[in-house]
Amino acid sequence: MQTLRRSIHAIAVSLALGAAAPALAAPFFQLSNAPGGAGPGDYFLSNDHWRAVRVYNAGTIENLAAGEFGLRFLETLPNGTPIGAPAFDLPTFCLEIGQRLLLPAIYEAMPVSAALPAAKADPIARLWGARFETVSDPASPIFEAVPGATSKDRVAAFQVAIWEIAVDGNNGLGTGQFRLLTTDAPLVGLAQAYLTIAYDPLRPFGEVRALISPDSQAQLAATDG
């Protein structure tokens, strides 16, 4: 968790000092909740795309909503002035666990490899590459191999796997600074399956970017849109 916070802080300081952005840096976006969302804060893609989970987070026990957001993107200048491109909607997942989503907010988009060290960026990119196969496909072998799993479990477990990678790496869901305390077998089974995918060196990387803001929770989103 501290590593992730230091990385994000370093990016924010670099921008404040006027240092050069990463070589492959993407544009800035204003993120807001997309019309038709449902769930806490009206940010989630739908009520089938999130569920409550109980976690240990750096010494505290928290009840969090874990799932897939449906957010509206408006391309802007760094100061938030719209560039003129129309707004569009993309699904996102949280990258950061220690900050809350406070929208609308301006985010800088960059390759996940520019926001995190390779030991964390590479597994996240592999996991993202399997997102449609494992989260969106109703006939997914991963999903069918976990009895009793629901669509809510799928997106929540995907989010839990991202948090585990970003905070601790792959040291297990029950140890470290981040721990999954919710014991539902389908959720735990899916989260473990996602981590296996993330650390499979034969898996291809997905096209994923990190969205970083000093004011709102960091996100992961696809590079298209």
Image (tube, rainbow, N blue to C red):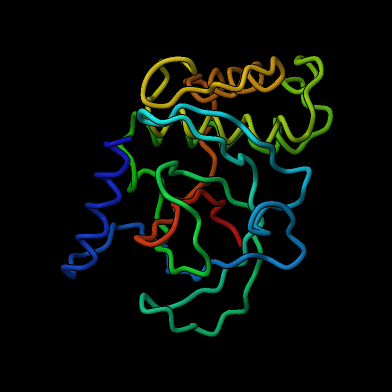
Q: Residue at x 51, y 25 (%)?
A: 198
Q: Residue at x 68, y 59 (%)?
A: 42
- Above or below residue 48? Residue 61 is above
Locate residue 53, reporting x and y percent.
Answer: 61, 31
Q: Residue at x 78, y 43 (%)?
A: 48
Between 202 and 111, which is closer to the camera in this rendering? 111
Residue sticking out furthest to the front: 61
Locate residue 57, reporting x and y percent.
Answer: 42, 31
Between 224 and 90, which is closer to the camera in this rendering? 90
Locate residue 116, reporting x and y percent.
Answer: 33, 41
Locate residue 9, reporting x and y percent.
Answer: 25, 52
Numbered-mark total:
0
Between 85 and 31, which is closer to the camera in this rendering? 31
Quadrant that contains the C terminus: bottom right
Q: Quadrant of residue 51?
A: top right
Q: Quadrant of residue 73?
A: bottom right
Q: Residue at x 74, y 55 (%)?
A: 38
- Above or below residue 18? Residue 148 is above
Quadrant that contains the N terminus: top left
